[in-house]
């Protein structure tokens, strides 16, 4: 029998790439998304989209009563570091209460496999050049704290209720499906790679760089950019891993290479052949200086191997989508 998978937040950036991979591999997929940020057009027409919110427990009850899910992928979270600092209440409600509601719905219907999107923001400023899973967790912002809380919940729920889970701590998801049909857009856009490309397109009046006084090689923040389809492929491997391994598991996902904001701009100028105007402003509250992953656990235990580790290629896939009139951020 084909496994039936629920993808919460399947209309969003990472979720829509996940849905594609699941469909390509023959899984039976249902998307639950409140479309607050997601885009219904990013989901294949064959996939049912239930528009609903994780804070609506009746909607969740109905969803789980009507479907026998084999596993749940949860991508439906608020993700802006800066906004989480200024409006923490909506972050705790959506990311923590919403996830607890989802886990309750799973428990009451006997669904036992859960894959959760966590983040490198759980670590705070690193104490070692590469961050492994057991690195101390000192999140610098409410966003990171909401994700760490759910990681802890999952460990407890694994022990008490037998929920099997895998948390993936993404470093910086970037890039787009090579089809050029889906990609990354948020409104307002807060992420670096799309903002760089919007500046390249002239769709924004240059890039604002948040701080150049960090203790890094050029003073700008360093991040580990990982292709969105590589993130999705790790999630596929997690299904089999949970079958063989009860309990709660955590993996870091990154390429192990850090790039400063200035280096991302230079790479994007090379890929696009365009000058990217920028201005330097103050630091953004809640940002760590450097976040680079040690992903050896995912490689060893999941057999994960990123297919697109090169930052220029990652940016190129994003650019192909951004400039595609039929699909990009300005498609009607
Ligand atoms: N950043 C920036 N300008 C932007 C967006 C992001 O300077 O318009 C910086 C941000 O402060 C951080 C890095 O780029 O140092 C990556 O930020 P992003 O929001 O993409 O991801 P995060 O690391 O917060 O998950």
Image: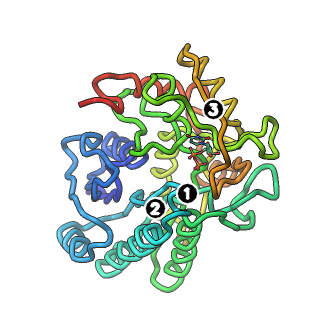
Question: What's the mark number on residue 168?
Answer: 1
Looking at the rendered structure, the secondary structure element under dot 3 is strand
Q: Residue at x 63, y 32 (%)?
A: 279
* Contact check, label 2 and label 1, Cβ < 8 Å: yes
Camera sees residue 198: yes
Give the spatial CA distance, label 2 vs label 3.
39 Å
Q: Where residue 44 sits in the image (x, y, percent)?
A: 24, 41
Side of 193 where 321 appears, left or right: left
**Looking at this rendering, what residue extends furthest in the bottom direction?**
160
Looking at the rendered structure, the secondary structure element under dot 1 is strand
Above-or-below relation of 327 to 186: above
Give the spatial CA distance, label 3 vs label 1.
33 Å
**Looking at this rendering, what residue extends furthest in the top direction?**
273
Above-or-below relation of 181 to 33: above
Q: Where residue 305 sits in the image (x, y, percent)?
A: 60, 41
What crowding class fits label 1: few (fewer than 14 Cα within 10 Å), some (14-19), or many (20 or more)? many
Disc 3 under 8 Å from ligand 1? The reply is no
Disc 2 under 8 Å from ligand 1? The reply is no
* Contact check, label 3 and label 1, Cβ < 8 Å: no
Of 252 and 124, the residue lying toward us: 124
What crowding class fits label 2: few (fewer than 14 Cα within 10 Å), some (14-19), or many (20 or more)? many
Can you identify the residue that label 2 sits on?
115
Can you identify the residue that label 3 sits on?
279
Q: Where residue 230 sits in the image (x, y, percent)?
A: 52, 41
- N-terminal of the pair, mark 2 or mark 1, is 2
Side of 110 where 81 appears, left or right: right
Q: Nearer the viewer, mark 3 or mark 1?
A: 3
Q: Residue at x 81, y 58 (%)?
A: 127
């Amino acid at each position: 029998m084909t496994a039936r998978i629920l993808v919460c937040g399947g209309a969003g950036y990472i979720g829509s790439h996940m849905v594609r991979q699941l469909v390509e591999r023959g899984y039976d997929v249902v998307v639950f998304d409140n479309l607050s940020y997601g885009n219904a057009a990013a989901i294949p027409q064959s996939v049912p989209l239930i528009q609903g919110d994780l804070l609506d427990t009746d909607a969740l009850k109905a969803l789980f009563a009507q479907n026998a899910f084999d596993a749940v992928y949860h991508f439906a979270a608020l993700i802006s570091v800066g906004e989480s600092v200024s409006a923490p209440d909506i972050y705790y409600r959506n990311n923590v209460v919403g996830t607890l509601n989802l886990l309750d719905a799973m428990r009451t219907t006997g669904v036992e496999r859960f894959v959760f999107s966590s983040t490198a923001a759980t670590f705070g400023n690193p104490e070692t050049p590469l961050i492994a899973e057991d690195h101390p967790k000192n999140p610098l912002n409410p966003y990171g704290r909401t994700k760490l809380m759910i990681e802890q919940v999952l460990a407890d729920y694994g022990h008490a209720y037998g929920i099997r889970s895998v948390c993936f701590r993404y470093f910086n998801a970037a890039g787009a499906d090579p089809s050029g049909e889906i990609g990354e857009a948020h409104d307002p856009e807060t992420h670096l790679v799309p903002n760089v490309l919007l500046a390249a397109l002239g769709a924004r009046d240059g890039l604002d760089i948040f701080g150049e006084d960090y203790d890094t090689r050029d003073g700008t923040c360093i991040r580990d950019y990982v292709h969105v389809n590589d993130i999705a492929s790790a999630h596929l491997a997690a299904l089999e891993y949970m079958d063989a391994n009860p309990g709660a598991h955590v993996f870091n996902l990154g390429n192990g290479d850090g790039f400063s904001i200035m280096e991302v701009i230079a790479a994007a100028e090379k890929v696009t052949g365009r000058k990217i105007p920028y201005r330097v402003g103050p630091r953004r509250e809640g940002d760590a200086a450097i976040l680079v992953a040690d992903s050896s656990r995912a490689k060893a235990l999941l057999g994960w191997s990123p297919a697109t580790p090169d930052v220029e290629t990652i940016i190129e896939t994003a650019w192909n989508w951004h400039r595609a009139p039929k699909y990009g951020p300005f498609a009607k």
